[in-house]
Amino acid sequence: MKLVYIVGPFRAATGWEIELNIRRAEALALEVWKLGAAAVCPHMNTRHFHGVLPDEVWLNGDLEIMSRCDAVITVDGWRNSAGSRAEVQLAIDLNLPIFHESEMLQRWLQLQ
């Protein structure tokens, strides 16, 4: 089973906007699971950890997790997030396939 990392904004101006970012990532993660891959959704992994440790701890951990995945898929609006842009750049550096639409991910999974 392929492991697909969800890339999308997390941080926002308000708690509600953060929650909406998490929900969008969760919805995409469920879609990935339905396509037959295992989704890694970092938004869900650290959703309640605000302020416990510096942001860099979570960001570095997420990048390490992503480096162990087979591909990434982006949530709409990912370009508006510096963190998401950094994740996509790392995916490029690691030669991971990057998908912006679930249909393209589905085609790729069928070929694996």
Image: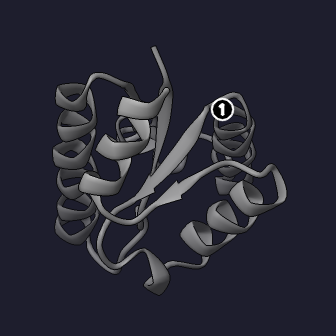
Determine whether 15 is above or below 25 in the image.
below
* Picture residue at 16% right of the left edge, 46% below the top: 27
* Picture residue at 62% right of the left edge, 31% below the top: 69
Q: Quadrant of residue 37?
A: top left
Residue 90 versus residue 108: which sits nearer the camera? 108
**Rendered location of residue 46, percent (x, y):** 45, 37
How is the rendered protein coloured? one colour
Instruction: Left or right? Give the position of 24 relative to 68.
Output: left
Q: Quadrant of residue 91?
A: bottom right
Q: Residue furthest front?
A: 111
Tag 1: Cα neighbours inside 10 Å, few (<14), some, or many (≥20)?
some
* Picture residue at 26% right of the left edge, 62% below the top: 21
Q: Callout 1, which amino acid?
A: Ile
**Rendered location of residue 61, percent (x, y):** 70, 37
Number of marks: 1
Residue ID for mark 1: 65
